Structure formats: C-alpha cells, structure tokens
Image (cartoon, grey):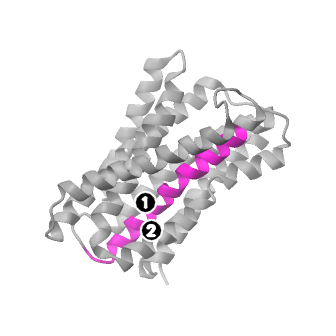
Amino acid sequence: MTFEQTSAVWQALLATFFTWGATAFGAGLVFAFKRVGRTLLDAMLGFSGGVMLAASFWSLLLPAKEMAETLSCEAAFPLCLGFLAGGLIIALGDRLFTALSGQRGDRSFGRRLLLVSSITLHNLPEGIAVGVAFGSVVYGLEGASLGAACTLAAGIALQNLPEGTAVSLPLHRDGMSRGKAFFFGQLSGAVEPIGGVFGAWLVLAARQLLPFLLSFAAGAMVYVVVGELVPESQNNEKRSLMTLFTLLGFALMMLLDVLLG
C-alpha cells in the first residue's frame, strides 16, 4: 500500500513522525559539536521563522479561505476567530510557563528546562496543523491537496531542526550529558504525532470546522514566529543578515508550496 492509499490519520501520523525525526536530528548535533556558533544558530532560527510565516499563509490561511468559500460559508469571521484563538492559546501557555518558572531571563539550568517545555507547547499546534492539512484532503475541497499537506510537513520539519539543536546544546553546556541532552532535545518534538492524529481525526469528524482549524493553526504558528524565533534571531549583531535568512526561508517555503500545492 502506497502513502497516497493510506488513511488521512495514518498519513498525518507518518508525516508528524517525520517532523519529530527532524527535531531529533537537530538535537543529535550535540554528539557532533560541543557548540554551534551564535550567528549560525540565529540564522537557522531566522530561516525557520520565514518558513513558518510562509507556511502559515500559503499552507493554512489561503486554503482556509478557499475551503470556506467551497463550503458556502462566510470566510472572514471563522478565519479571524481561528487565527486569534490560535495565538491566544500559545500566549496563555507562555504566561503559564513564565509564572511557573519565576524569572525567565536568566540562563540557568531551570531556564533551559523551561525552553524544553515552551518548544514542546509550540510543537503541539504544528502537529495539529499537519493533521488538519492531511484530513482536509479527504473532502476534495479547493485548496486541499496531498502535495500541499506534504509541503507543510516539510516546512515544519525544516524549522524543527534548529529547535532541537537550540535545546540539546545549551543543556549539554549547562552540564548535562550528551545522551540526556539529546533525549530532552528530541522529546520536545514528541508531541507532534499526537497533535497530528488529533488534528486529522477532528477534521474527519467535523468538516465544517476546517476553515477555523486551519486558521487556528496559522495563528499559533505566527505567534511562535513573532514572539520567539524572529526576536531571538534579531538579538544577533548582524541583524540585516538575520533578516535576509528570514526572507530566504519565506521564499523557499513559498516556492515549494506554489510548485507542489
């Protein structure tokens, strides 16, 4: 049985195992390097931000608009509501982790464990986004295609690489063994298969929720980009170069989505 012939839930599960694997690969760099240069890591984060921004529009918001029109419902309200709800959920999660951690700005070991928790929280809506994308293909609606769903999964996998590295290397630098640092680094992506299966199941159970769910995932992803990835990369003294990497990530994801979607 080919990938195209499997059910949407299995497709979402396999795709999110792939994105989890990308997180694990990034975390595995702790075995190859004692450290990764700040500029390189910031460039990877900026690039990831561009990828996620492009995926939010081309793979989520635009298909959500087209699906709403196909379903003969008003697109503006569910898209706006879903987009804002997605960002609000992640914002509330961030505030919760901040309250539990006390001072977020230190570079202590506790700060690194907070980073693991935060990235884990961010990865959950990414998994849901992949699941929703694969689940929507079943209905044959305009804007939904297997190629677009695969492109979204590939884009999320790209941005997961530096996330895994950003967790495992600092943990190792703070005294944790390479094996344990890798374990916690890859663990941050383990929620994506859970989110993928849930997203695909939810779409199959409630077709009319498609525009809302896609825009919800987009809002969550944009919050991560604006609140975490871009600000972190812009702390680098080579800000213009970091911005160019963000543009490059956006352009690459847009190209893939237009060609394959």
Q: Amino acid at mark 2?
A: Gly
- Note whether residue 189 is visible: yes
- Amino acid on which the number 1 mark rests in the picture: Ala
- Which of the two residues, 44 or 3, is positioned nearer the viewer here? 44
Extent of the magenta region: 112-140
Q: Residue at x 30, y 51 (%)?
A: 58
Asked if residue 199 lies in the magenta stretch, the reply is: no
Neighbour tally class for label 2: few under 14, some 14-19, many 20 plus, Cα within 10 Å: many
Mark 2 falls on what kind of element? helix
Main SS of residues in magenta: helix
- At 47% from the left and 76% from the top, the residue drawn is 9
The residue wearing badge 2 is 199
Picture coordinates of residue 28, whole percent (x, y): 72, 47
Question: What residue is at 44 percent from the left and 76 percent from the top?
Answer: 201
Quadrant for residue 14, please give it: bottom right
* Residue topped by disc 1: 129
Front residue of 54/226: it is: 226
Q: Is residue 244 above or below residue 157?
A: above
